[in-house]
Image: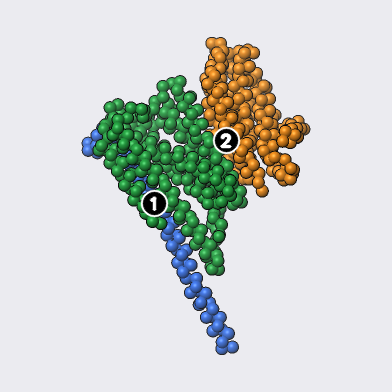
Chain colours: A orange, B green, C blue
Amino acid sequence: MRRAVGALLRKELALELRAPMTLAGMLLFSVTTLIVFHFALDERSVEGDLAAGVLVVTLLFAAMLGINRLFVTDHEEGGFDAFLLAPVDRTALFVAKALALLGFLFALELVMLPIFALLLLGPTLTAGVLGKSLLVLALADVGIAVIGTLVAALGIQTRARDLLVPLIALPLLVPVVIGAASGLSPVLEAAGDAAVPGRWLAILALYDLVFGLLAYAVFDFLLEE
Amino acid sequence: MTSLRILSLATVALLCGGFALAAFHAPMDANEGFVQKIFYLHVPLALVALGGFVFGAVAAVQHLRSGDPRHDLRSYVAIHLSLVLGIAVLVTGAIWAKASWGIWWEWREPMLVSFLIVFLLYCTYQPLRFSIEDREKQSRYASVFAVTAGAFVPLCFGAVRAAESYIHPQTFNSTDNLPGSMWLAFLVCLAGMTLLFVTLWRFEIAHKMTRARVRSLKRRLGGVDDPVVGRSAAPQLSSP
Amino acid sequence: MTDNLPDNGGYVAAAYLVFLALLLVYVAIMAIRLGRLERELTQLDELPDAADHAARERAREQAPA
């Protein structure tokens, strides 16, 4: 199983490196969204609650782009049939895709956080702030990756994919939004960053665990012929 | 069919009895006054709707394990009914909020906010079904959705509750210090609402199965099949 | 109108009426579906007669010839 996941993951990354549409698209979209937020909020700098909210929403919507495209090439180019013929555990596809999405999200944040600090963030992005933000966002990313992969797989069979996938994924991700925004807002306060409240890390971790296990158990049924 | 008859009579008795108890037997609430009487309608509706969603998830699990389309039908009808009850929950909740605090919506009421999120999620259930043409795939994917959404319900309520506890939650009321007569009225209303759900659920399933039998009979007797007008989101029972 | 009801009684009445209305709408929809079912059943009822009629027509056409 681990080899299958490794092979699939390598394929995903190779595809992305060859034609970097998804990651570049997500990055461009986030920067544009930050600009839109500047004009929509009419704020030159944000901090605390507002900063956390802007960051989480931007991340979420960029993630939606990635999620929409997750299984598209497999579906169109017949990758599914090839995979189903291989004698591997079908859940390997889920793990590989989720890990790939997780990688994209993390790479996105590494680039987006400094840009966010440059454009909109009031308090300076010290190493401490950066580190704590990445911790919270990492837990949130796992949740987004798990739910995103599951819902993307739910949507492959439908032509109204682009519409349905965000509609299903966004309510499911509300706890992640709550956890991430509430966890980030004390960190991004102007008065100097505070520690991340432990309860939100716990809630995010619980969410990741529950849905990780659920998606793992249930993914097989989506690939049966 | 006799069970349906008994169920409906029991439903009427319990529901009317419950409302009567709420109106005449339960005392007036000290803080809220007469408006508190909405509690006997709104909370049973919410609890039964959520129970229906969870039951839909359980039936979906059974469907995934056995492949029997009847479980899928049970899951579909349960979720569909809970959605209708959900509309009633949100409307009565808004009315209660307006009566208690003068505004139609209150973000600090965690139950209502959580319920809205869950409701919005389940609103995508029928469009999802409708968009998948293959009947067997439709049932399977719908069951996966129902299971995921069912697991989501407690998580959502927990997360929203945790979020709102920073600011004092403006809960409608606390069920901690309910006097005995209020508890009685509430429990009877809850039982009546549960039976209402079960009755309507049985009713709708009976209707769908009957219609499937009529259709299959028509096909076997060589009658002219009514042209299927568009796809349906409801599970189609295959001809026996 | 709110003289007959205690203060804020209008809201309570509205809430219960919404519930009642939803319930009755549901019953109405089920009644419509029942009507449709009955129509299909009448079609089924008439099928044997239609088949007999068609068979008799065919026999009549073949007999004199």
Q: Nearer the viewer, residue A184 or A195?
A: A195
Residue C3 appears anywhere in the view: yes
A90 w.r.t. A204: above or below: below
Residue found at x 42% / y 58%: C34
Per the rendering, the mark at residue C27 is 1
The image position of residue B234, as x and y in percent, is: 52, 50
Per the image, label 1 sits on a secondary structure element best described as: helix
Per the rendering, the mark at residue A169 is 2
Taking the image as shown, residue B175 lies to the left or right of residue B23, namely right
Tell me if label 1 and label 2 are in contact, CB under 8 Å.
Answer: no
Q: Quadrant of residue B29?
A: top left
The image position of residue A221, as x and y in percent, is: 62, 43
Quadrant location, the N terminus of chain A: top right
A20 w.r.t. B212: above or below: above
Q: Amino acid at mark 2?
A: Ala
Residue found at x 52% / y 35%: B152
Q: Are marks 1 and 2 on the same chain?
A: no
Q: Chain of mark 2?
A: A
Q: How many marks?
A: 2
Q: Nearer the viewer, residue B84 or B154?
A: B154
Taking the image as shown, residue A89 lies to the left or right of residue B114, namely right
Q: Chain of mark 1?
A: C
Q: Amino acid at mark 1?
A: Val
Residue found at x 57% / y 32%: A210
Spatial CA distance of label 1 from label 2 is: 34 Å
